[in-house]
Amino acid sequence: MALNVAVQMDPIERINIRGDSTFALLLAAQARGHKLSYYTPDRLAMRDGRVFATVQPLGVQDVEGAHYKLGEERRAAIEEFDVVLMRQDPPFDLSYITATHFLERVHPRTLVVNDPAHVRNAPEKVFVTLFPELMPPTLITRDLAEIKAFRAEFGDIVMKPLYGHGGGAVFRVTREDLNFGSLYDMFAASFREPWVVQRFLPNVKQGDKRIILVDGEFAGAVNRVPAPDDLRSNMVRGGAAEPTELSDREREICTRLGPALRERGLLFVGIDVIDGYLTEINVTSPTGIRAVKKVGGPDIAELIWDKIEAKRSA
């Protein structure tokens, strides 16, 4: 079954194809005979309640420096597509939220992956708090007294912006760290939203697992080990990818999350687990597909298209 597929993503000329999950999805779609069209979120428009975009036919190949070819622009109604992949990266800001409102107008007649309304309502560091029993002690606030009390209780803490991404502005603060006041002032000046404050997990040096779930089922995982001089294990921050197996605790986490993900139409999700603790549920533009395959895991892009095709044929 050939599908008419649109991908809403960041500028394709800027992506690093070696690790880009969107690119892996496009390669797999093309290999299955699906017709691809490309547009960036700024090319969306709503006219009298209908959603349009200026799109271009897209061809891809796994060749660095020559990884895409675009055809002529045309104005298309989003409802004409069978599937839209909503794959622009955060920041999760008002622009991102507006895009979810636009795509909500066509879903589920046009299958949007992931469901735009639930993407809007499930930002990574908020959705996860529905499962406090799976998390490390976590506080979300910008109130100094609350943060001081949390720090006094746990000593070592991690502070990060609530809508941050890619490991940006993640700081460890120890019990005696004299930089705490300055760090608080910097966060207060830089971010209007609350911040996430969590108990520091020392075993992060052993790795931060990215576990991918497809339609609520475990699909693959990679262990991301931080560089010796860095707290963050994100691969864009220098983290190294290693093969891994799931522990019983990690399988329990997947089992607990699965029904909630399926109910919300969150078909492609990446969760982060450190030392058996769930820290984030990534639903906006999850990554990890190519990393899992490179360390000997399954081709998750194929699993995702199996699910999409099944949903479109139902």
Image (cartoon, rainbow, N blue to C red):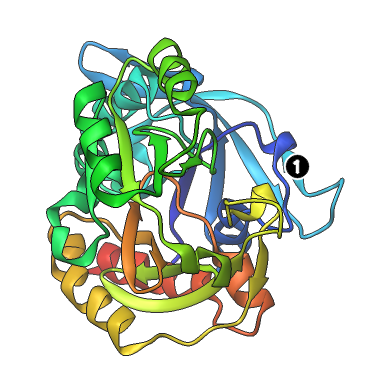
Say left or right for 192 vs 33. left
211 up-or-down from 9: above or below: below
Say left or right for 11 vs 137. right
Q: Is residue 113 visible?
A: no
Q: Nearer the viewer, residue 194 or 215?
A: 194
The quarter of the image holding the N terminus is: bottom left
In the image, farthest residue toward the front: 176
Residue at screen point 50% across, 73% down? 300
Residue at screen point 21% across, 61% down? 261
Q: Is residue 66 visible?
A: yes
Q: In which quarter of the image is residue 14?
A: top right
127 up-or-down from 144: above or below: below
Residue at screen point 31% across, 15% down? 46
Label 1 sits on a secondary structure element that is: strand
Q: Disc 1 marks which residue? A: 69
Q: In which quarter of the image is residue 105?
A: top left
In the image, farthest residue toward the right: 65
How far across and how far down the image is residue 282, in percent?
37, 52
- The type of residue carrying mark 1 is Lys
How far across and how far down the image is residue 277, in percent?
32, 67
How far across and how far down the image is residue 226, in percent?
63, 60
94 up-or-down from 119: above or below: above
Report crowding for label 1: few under 14, some 14 to 19, many 20 or more residues within 10 A (C-alpha): few
Residue at screen point 71% across, 60% down? 228
How far across and how far down the image is residue 306, in percent?
40, 74
The quarter of the image holding the C terminus is: bottom left
